[in-house]
Image (spheres, rainbow, N blue to C red):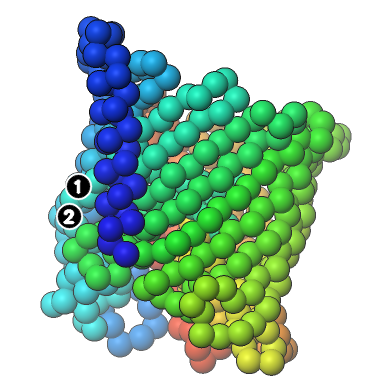
Amino acid sequence: MKSKSTAILSAASLLFSAATTAVADAGDDLATAITSGKAGINVRARYEGVDKDNALKDANALTTRLRLNYRTGKWQGWSAFAEYDHVFHLIRDFNAGGGTTPAKDGVYQTVLDPKGSDLNQLYFNYSVSDDWKLRIGRQRVLLDNQRFVGGVGWRQNEQTYDALSVSTSAVPHTALLYAYVGQVRRILGQNSAAGKMNVETHLLNAKVTINDSWSVTPYLYLIDNDDAAATSTSTLGARLAGNVKVGGGKVGLVAELATQSDAGNNPASYDAEYSHLSALWSMDSGLSLGLAYESLGTDSANFESFRTPLATLHAFQGWADMFLSTPDEGIDDLYATVKFKAGKWNLTGVYHDFSAETGSFDFGTEFDLSAGTKLSDNYGILFKGAFFSSDSLSYVDTNKFWIMFTANY
């Protein structure tokens, strides 16, 4: 299976080389495209503290990510992009996960930010026409709100995909994307056996614009995971999103339904449902109020629950990350959101009430708070906290706190 990922990256290089050979007399233009590109530097330093009501020591992690990237100019419809990351550990009192810090495993709480280097992205774009675009190589794949397919951008080592993706707007009012994924480069990095997943995955997503305010997005995601057969799934769903004007502002509305079943080499046989309903009233005063309900169901006959192995999980079901795997009983999340823009500061508060989708018991509640601002065009700072209170023997009270500084050039 390793050869699939290598083949995708190698094919990207071969395609580009073939194109350059075919028009060797345009070498000066190619050189200009390569040298006239844009370089970028990003530094992200973050302190993360984790306090759980168990026997492990509290985690204190100070990590820094240096990201370097370069995007070429265009030549004959081609362009390229490369991105390299390195994560440093400055305060190391934590378990980085995935066996990357064996001396800390079983001693400290976990912060999933292993140190090390990573070729985060390396891909080639080809514009077949204004309506058709192809991308091959290691790349981000971020679909809708990243509930099912995302990049886990909160962690220092991002999740990217060795993939071939094709996007088109040739169908009127429709943005269609298909991606074939051969390998998932996970947040644990190349120093962990769990840092990648060999897959045969097909992702199909079509956003249809109904009018200026509303769109509907049907999707089909087929995952055949060679390394974790229990996450081989077929997910079919649709997402309706739009807004209506109310008073001095507008209400953003989302309704999403999906069904999932086993696929590929999955040893289980199950069917589970997903639903999400949300409303967020954004007022001209800078205040936003929201109420939402999300449910990941379970097959009650055998307690096989709805799975999201490619999701940006930190963005959902609370920032304390208590439910990175869906409980066997499924999970219902009723949550309320308050946002306020105070000068240059963006303030957010979220309250979650978690309960089992099947059964009548509670998992717990959580408060999430954040305050962030741009210090200038290049610098930003964020304070963030998550406070989970357990109502179940399966989970423990958990507090997490972050201070993050970013610099972009």
Residue 39 picture quarter: top left
Q: Quadrant of the N terminus?
A: bottom left
Q: Which mark is residue 129?
A: none
Residues 153 and 185: in front is 185
Query: Does any portion of residue 319 appear in the rendered image?
Result: no
Apparent side of residue 47 relative to residue 351 in the rendered image (left or right): left
Name the kind of residue labelled 1 in the image: His
Tell me if label 2 and label 1 are in contact, CB under 8 Å. Answer: yes
Instruction: Name the residue at 50% across, 88% down.
Output: 394
Residue 342 picture quarter: top right
Query: Horizontal and vertical percent for residue 330?
Result: 63, 80
In this figure, which residue is indicated by the disc labeled 1? 86
Query: Horizontal and vertical percent for residue 135?
Result: 43, 36
Question: Which of the two labelled residues, at mark 2 and mark 1, occupies the earlier sequence position?
Answer: 1
Q: CA distance from mark 2 to mark 1?
A: 6 Å
Query: Does any portion of residue 109 appear in the rendered image?
Result: yes
Q: Quadrant of the C terminus?
A: top left
Apparent side of residue 252 relative to residue 90 in the rendered image (left or right): right
Query: Horizontal and vertical percent for residue 237?
Result: 71, 59
- Crowding at label 2, few (<14), some or many (≥20) Cα neighbours within 10 Å? some
Residues 358 and 193: in front is 193
- Crowding at label 1, few (<14), some or many (≥20) Cα neighbours within 10 Å? some
In this figure, which residue is indicated by the disc labeled 2? 116
**Image position of 256 with respect to 397: above or below:** above
Instruction: Name the residue at 39% across, 40% down.
Output: 136
Name the kind of residue labelled 2 in the image: Gly
Secondary element under disc 2, as helix, strand or loop, is: strand
Secondary element under disc 1, as helix, strand or loop, is: strand
Instruction: Name the residue at 68% across, 78% down.
Output: 271
Query: Horizontal and vertical percent for residue 402?
Result: 37, 55
